[in-house]
Amino acid sequence: MANLKRLIFWTSFALVAAACIGASYYVRYSAERRGSTEASLARDEALRIQQQVVLFTKRIVPSGRPFSVFLHGLGIDSPTTARLAAAAQPVFDLRHLRAGNELDVGRSVLGDLREVRYSIDADRVLSIAPQGDDFHSEIETIPSHTETVGVGGEIDDSLFQGIVDAGEKPELAMRLAAIFGWDLDFYTDPRPGDTFRVVVEKKTLANGTLVDYGRILAAEYDNAGHAYRAILFRGPTGAPAYYTPEGKSMKKAFLHSPLKFAAPITSHFSLHRFHPILKQYRAHLGIDYGAPTGTPVQTIGDGRVIFAGRKGGDGNLVKVQHSNGYTTYYMHLSRIAVRPGQRVEQGQRIGLVGMTGLATGPHLDFRIELRGQFLNFERLPLPPSDPVARRDWGEFAAARDRALAQMPQLTPNRPALAQNHPPQAPASAQGRP
């Protein structure tokens, strides 16, 4: 009996020991297998990272630096730079890099070159990437969406700040100032409490980032209770132009000044002025604007250059003949940028301020003549451009009504422009078929 018990004990002990040894081997085998699998996965992940992960270094293109020099500064050797430029040439000339645009260099985690990307503009990106033993380039189009939206706000300080406070870019303020620039001086005219409303096309990326503004279809600026309104239509030549809701041109035939930026008037129009060089009283039939040498001079209206050259005491002179019978004179220029017979457009640069001829200092002597008589430009009402043509009135009215219907609401005491009754066609335009 005792022997049977011992046999049963040792048999059970052997079985338990065998089971423990087997479990130990199983755990060890599982751990080794799991470790092998994890090691394989780690190797695969490391390989994927090396092959697929690209780390980009972003830089802004500086002014006046060639593509090769710029890339060399980013650690790309000269032979590779030459191959990149050659690969890009069929689709984009890298000599046209624009200062301020973004250029990105992508490398693997091991430092191998994977891609060079250059933002051509808001819609296009140049991509240069390895392909086999060489590089391949293409221009990618950035997906975007354009929609027409209404934007509005109130002025506390300036139009610039009001636009920013409304969540928009300063560019929109510049666009508005250009539209109303014939009626308002946005340096001096804005008042706290003024309001603006705009119907504008906005181009955005898929993530909602604003890329650019498109056309401004309608705009309103309420200056101390006086509302100025503009509607986009086409001008006589077919080019885009702005008109009041009544069809009058927002654009005047002449700009307020032959200089793009404000300049002090150092001598006014006078029939009896003491000449600082000739030391005698004589008529001064123009306006002198004091400005540094090299300041750009612009023509105040469309026209044709009838004289461009040196003329006695006038120094370097440009004369422009305008279609409405006016002739404008730009005198004492340091440089002339147009030639006789050339057509010029309103705001086009025609020369630079100087002090040639009879001049004691750098300035522009600007004169305006109508049919042989010189006029005082400071007191001259700026003649308007042509209104909407009679034949286009129906199309203009439809475009106006569509745009005004999208004007945003502001406050209850400032009703939306769209609620106003649309103006009727001028008498000359009514009753047509």
Image: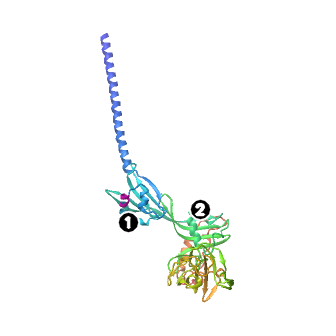
From the top left corner, tell me how far across and down residue 174 is, in percent.
Answer: 57, 68
Q: Which residues are magenta?
A: 78-82
Of residues 357 and 192, which is closer to you in this image? 357
Q: Is residue 144 above or below residue 335?
A: above
Q: Amino acid at mark 2?
A: Val
Q: Which residue sits furthest top? A: 1
The residue carrying mark 1 is: 91
Of residues 433 and 279, which is closer to you in this image? 279
Of residues 325 and 211, which is closer to you in this image? 325
Q: Is residue 64 above or below residue 316?
A: above
Please identify, in this view, whether the residue under mark 1 or under mark 2 is nearer the observer: 1
From the top left corner, tell me how far across and down residue 265 is, in percent.
Answer: 65, 76
- The N terminus - image quarter: top left
- Which mark is drawn over residue 372? none
Measuring 30% from the left and 15% from the top, which residue is drawn there?
7
Q: Amino acid at mark 1?
A: Val
The residue carrying mark 2 is: 164
Quarter occupied by residue 423: bottom right
